[in-house]
Amino acid sequence: MAALVVPADWIRNWEKSGKNEFLQLCRNLAESKPSDDVTLRDIQAALYELAWQVIKGNLKLDQAASVLNDVMEFREDMSSILADVFCILDIETGCLEEKNKREHFTQLVGACLVLVPDTVLKERLDPETLESLGLIKQAQQFNQKIVKIKTKLFYKQQKFNLLREENEGYAKLITELGQDLSGNITSRLVLENIKSLIGCFNLDPNRVLDIILEVYECRSDQDEFFVPLIKSYMCEAQTLCHILGFKFKFYQEPNGETPSSLYHVAAALLQHNLIELGDLYVHLLPMDPSILEEHKREITEAKQIARKLTMVVVPSEKTEEKDKEKEKEEEKNEKPPDNQKLGLLEALLKIGDWQHAQSIMDQMPSFYAASHKSIAVALCQLLHITIEPLYRRAGVPKGAKGALNRPLKSKQAPKPAEAFEDLRKEVFTMLCYLGPHLSHDPVLFAKIVRLGKGFMKEYQNDKQEDKDRMDTLLSCFLSITDQVLLPSLTLMDCNACMSEELWGLFKMFPYQHRYRLYGQWKNETYNSHPLLVKVKAQTVDRAKYIMKRLTKENVKPSGRQIGKLSHSNPTILFDYMLSQIQWYDNLITPVVDSLKYLTSLNYDVLAYCIIEALANPEKEKMKHDDTTISAWLQSLASLCGSVFRKYPIELAGLLQYVTNQLKAGKSFDLLILKEVVQKMAGIEIADEMTQEQLEAMTGGEQLKAEGGYFGQIRNTKKSSQRLKDALLDHELALPLCLLMAQQRNGVVFLEGGEKHLKLVGKLYDQCHDTLVQFGGFLASNLSTEDYIKRVPSVDILCNQFHTPHDAAFFLSRPMYAHQILSKYDELKKTEKGNRQQQKVHKYIAACDLVMAPVHDSVVSLHPPKVWDDISPQFYATFWSLTMYDLAVPHNAYDREVNKLKVQMKAIDENPEMPPNKKKKEKERCTALQDKLQEEEKKQLEHVQRVLQRLKLEKDNWLLAKSTKNETITKFLQLCIFPRCIFSAIDAVYCARFVELVHQQRTPNFCTLLCYDRVFSDIIYTVASCTENEARRYGRFLCCMLDTVTRWHSDRAIYEKECGNYPGFLTILRATGFDGGNKADQLDYENFRHVVHKWHYKLTKASVHCLETGEYTHIRNILIVLTKILLCYPKVLNLGQALERRVHKICLEEKEKRPDLYALAMGYSGQLKSRKPYMVPENEFHHKELPVRNTGPTTVQNGPGSAGKPASTTSTGKPEEGASEENEKSKEKSQSAVKAASKTNNTTPKVTTSNGNGATNSTKLIKEKEDKDKSGKEKNKEKKEKTPAATPEAKAPGKEKQKEERPGKEEKTRETKEKTPKSEKEKFKKDEKASKDDKAKASGGESKSSAEKEREKEPSKERDVAKEAKTKESSKGEKAAVAGSLKSPVPRSESSESEREQKRRKLDTHSSPSHSSTVKDNLNELKDSATKHYTNHSTATLSKSKEREVDKKDMEKSRDRSREREKKERKRDHSNSDREVAQELKRRKDENGTSSSKHSKSESPSNSPQPNEKEKEKSKSSKSSSKEKSDSAKPEKGSSGGKKESRHDKEKAEKKEKRESTGAKEDKKHHKSSDKHR
């Protein structure tokens, strides 16, 4: 290294430049201060190199000496550095053999004696070198002298005065140290005196030090005097440490107690660095391993205590445990020696020496030191002092003063915090070491919390400046809250003020932060410290004690105990309480009432605990049977509703939880939202509403609140406001609505895969009900601006958010109402006019302005084809109105007003009520009464305006560009059916709207068709409903039936409300012409027939559903039947059929499915109670007396009647050709009107007839009437004789029926042969007479009959074809028919082959547009054939006898007909028409009656052709056979129907008479009716 420092060039050119270079180098090295050691080494290296050059002879001695002389000035210690260099060179040259080098060295040292003191050289050079230099005389003597001095210093003991010998010196020493120090006495003066005393009295210096420390202990407040004294007296730390160690050792005996003054002395010496902590620490007891063991033992004991508290202990075990506890207590009484480490720690904290204190705490387990109260208090005091300045600036509340904490005098104490940033240096660290033991100082707790509040204010006002720094501080505060504040609150004794203080900070955190903190507190904090483990166990034990004794009667005292316990340990308490509530739901009410003594923080913790309990992944949310939601979830949901309503708890967390669950596709937790909205807003979901409640729900808000709900939920204003604010603040209102709307289908298609169907239905209902309830809440509580701002338009809801249409309109409806009203108010203000007419015009203008965009937007919701039948305006009007807009519930208003009057009367008569309270209550009732009356008036005006608006709009509603049948289909499909199952009020609305459309005389709306479609086949609708939807659908049917029943009940009502209305036209003319021809209207008696048919249809559908065995079918139909009980069944025989089937269900399901059994029993009981109100069939609608039939044929009228004997009439090919020719000629002669009507069907060639409430050819009906009636009477008789042939008779399996068919056909033939001739003749005479009467009555219409017959031929052909087709295609679906039973109909082979040909021939014909359900059509198809054959084939005679009888009959009938024709031509045309409709109705009823059992060869489910076509087919075959005369007789004879051909001949003659008058009208009606079916 030296070579690098002094290059060889310098030595060579020493005089020129080398000397200066070297001096410059040395100067630079002396002045630079990178590191003292480095500089020193470099200077030593330079000097060493220079000296070595001299020794080697490269440099002259005088040159080196002069340079070294100059170098000495650069540093003070340069002589010592040079001496070190000489020392090294002395050793090196002494080892060399070259003596000249040694001489050079000696000369160099000699030359430098002036520069280096002799004493320094004597220390460092070898004695021989010193001798050669002349510094000592002899080396040997010098060595001996050194040995003597060392012996004297280190090995010879000096005798000091140790106090025993003489105590005067020590007495003076103590006096010196104990004197008054307040004057000018300083430690330096005293030290001089001490030295004098030591010297004078020969005192032991160590003993003097010990006495100084003793006096210091006694005067521990004199730190400023004693510390400098000790520092100047004894600067050796080890000696001082040993003396202190001996002092501590003295107190380490059992029961020894170390004085605090000694700790203080040791702490002060440590703080001033007079001793090292590590040196002193080893003298202190106990040892660190024993401290660790003690800590572990404490944890184990705490866990054992916790276990004992949670265990059930037998009394005998209790005594043993008590004995053990006593022994332990005795052991504890032997007090171990003090923990000196903790004592020293406390002293250090008291004087503010945090660094050394922290070092000691680090040696121990976490929180071990702070768990000792003295340590915790000392640390708290240090914290008080440290945070004082910042607390005064940012934490003190307004008006508070508080005691000042003076800062510590010591400079080594932590620096007080002036800003929040300063807290990070030491305060947060101290708090973390303190942990849960901050509980010892509630004042400091409050100060820290207030500092947190101060910081949060700054943080919230911070404008993104120093965001990172503020975020760091926020995370620090959150950590302190988690690790210190909450655990400390746990250990505090029931301090409600601290809880409220802490809430002041917590409410500034978002709920996510708060819940995270509560989660840590509940699940982790309690396990971190033995003390907390004990507290947790004690809290649970106490909670058990309280909950066992909690009842409704002792809510107040128990509530106080709960409140007391909850101030400190809310999480543990609530966790236990919630677990109890999940088991015992009867605890909910007392628990909710007992929570009134909680603090705000506790309420927030309760919200968290509820959410945690709901989200518990270990709990199943459905019962083990997988069909119902678990009871624990229902209990928690109920608790949620009650608690959140009663107490001011923040809802955001709970609402977000429900939203997140919905996002994840889980709908169980909607139960919570449902309960919360119900309790907080007072909006109930009740499908079991009474009629009065439902009526009240159609009024204004006040009426709804008073009469619309089961529980009078009052005072919901504040709670509903809180719920609204939570939804708006966190933007959850619309997301919840959309998620619920989407989740309805999600329940079925996403969730429903593995779940039981029953549970899926419940979840769907829950989702739907909650949506309705929640939407209702938003509509009634959000302001117009808030609502409009949040809910997008319908097209966006449907197309972008994929919201189902019904839900989208449900959400948008309040928006339209708000907008219309606000626009209406605007228009009223602009033009001042009070006339009612002006107001209406303004209202309509407002509606147009608001609804025009809606009309445009709904177009995108459906395919363009839809708008051919109904207009967007009609669609939007239907979906945007509510019951509030259509009718005023005057009865409900009157009822509530009367209730209030009764209340006021009761208040007056109550003598116990104080006068003030009386006055207040009366004022309340009066105010409420006024509000209700005002609301009623307001609604009345509103309804009048709406009805005016609808009156103006109605002409544009139904466009009917295709057919009226299609129009009704679209109306039902897109409007009525989706909405009637949306809510109970919507169900009523739909029924009312249909009635309103009828009353408004809306063009193109066929009321009959609409009602018929609703009642005709309800099987599919019922089967696809959930439980609640079935209730609503039942309510809808009930309202529809109620209207029909009202019309049915009285001719005057019918004539007034329906008689002259276009909705009751039975002949449907071209679109746009709803002529008021009285003859076209359905008369009252025929309407009664139609109603009977509807009742029959309902019975048939009900029986079918009950027989399926399917859970959903049975449950839903029972619910529907219960709902429509007031209006159905009205007919005795239908009621009896239902009763028998329901009784069977009761027997079958009693053990298997108890819920179905309960429903069936309930309905059965109610049905029996309604029996007195049922009437026989002939009272329900006009029936002629039955003709007795003595034959053994079993005929039954009613649902599920047994098969009737029948023979099949089949026409030959010539007849087919004739019918086709007739049809073609008929088509050519049709008028323009008929042509237009025909084009509504896809195939103009095919015109169809219908048997569902539309009038066909009068003559045909008249001909059929007697046959039908007589057949029906016979059926009725037989029904009484053969009760087994009711729907219950259908129970045996379908397979069995198949096997029995051939046998039954044989029986039928036998029956026909056995029928007596006299009976046959009598029957024929009656028939002919009635036919003649009708022929005369139907005067002018006779001409059209032949044309009609021709028309009906194609429809007959198509029916035959379809029937055969159906028979082949749907063998597997036979079991699906409502009450499909066997019919013993023998079919001829010619008939079968003929049908097959026709099917191939007419395959290209598309069926007319009808949407009546397929199943029903088939049944009626079968029924028509059965009925036809039943009526005409009562007996079988030989061919010759038949011909004779027929001739006689024909002659008689011709005579009668001529006479009656003359009389009845004068009759009113309307009479004839009414009879036509009546006969049509009878036929339809007969169709239904006989439909229950039919030939298995016909498919029960697939033929889409209506039954009337089958009838017409039969009739046309008969008429054509009549015309063809004998050519067809062999064929007819083969099928057993020769007699019928004569009847047909007679009919054909009568038809020709009527052809000219009614053909066109009848045909048109005939076609439209068919479409309807």
Image (tube, rainbow, N blue to C red):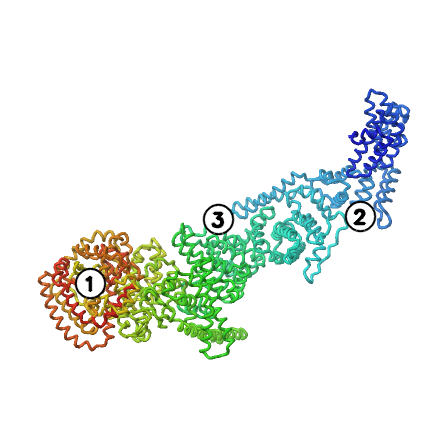
**Where is 1173 relative to 202, above or below?**
below
Q: Secondary structure at mark 3?
A: loop
Lower sequence index among marks 1 and 3: 3
Q: Decide: marks 1, 3 in contact (CB < 8 A)?
A: no
Label 3 crowd (10 A; few <14 / some 14-19 / many >=20): few
Label 2 to label 3: alpha-carbon separation: 66 Å
Q: Is residue 1524 left or right of residue 543?
A: left
Give amino acid for label 1. Glu
- Closer-to-camera residue (1476/1305): 1476
**Where is 1083 relative to 133, above or below?**
below
- What residue is pinned by disc 1? 1221
Q: Secondary structure at mark 1?
A: helix
Q: Is residue 16 left or right of residue 1523?
A: right
- What residue is pinned by disc 3? 618
Give amino acid for label 3. Glu
Q: Is residue 485 left or right of residue 889?
A: right
- What residue is pinned by disc 2? 222
State the mark number for residue 762. none
Q: Is residue 813 left or right of residue 1045?
A: right
Q: Would you identify the image quadrant in which residue 1287 lies?
A: bottom left
**Where is 91 relative to 1409, above or below?**
above
Front label number (1 vs 3)? 1
Label 2 crowd (10 A; few <14 / some 14-19 / many >=20): few
Q: Residue 265 appears at what percent x and percent y?
A: 76, 44
Q: Quadrant of the N terminus?
A: top right
Q: Would you identify the image quadrant in which residue 406 lies?
A: bottom right
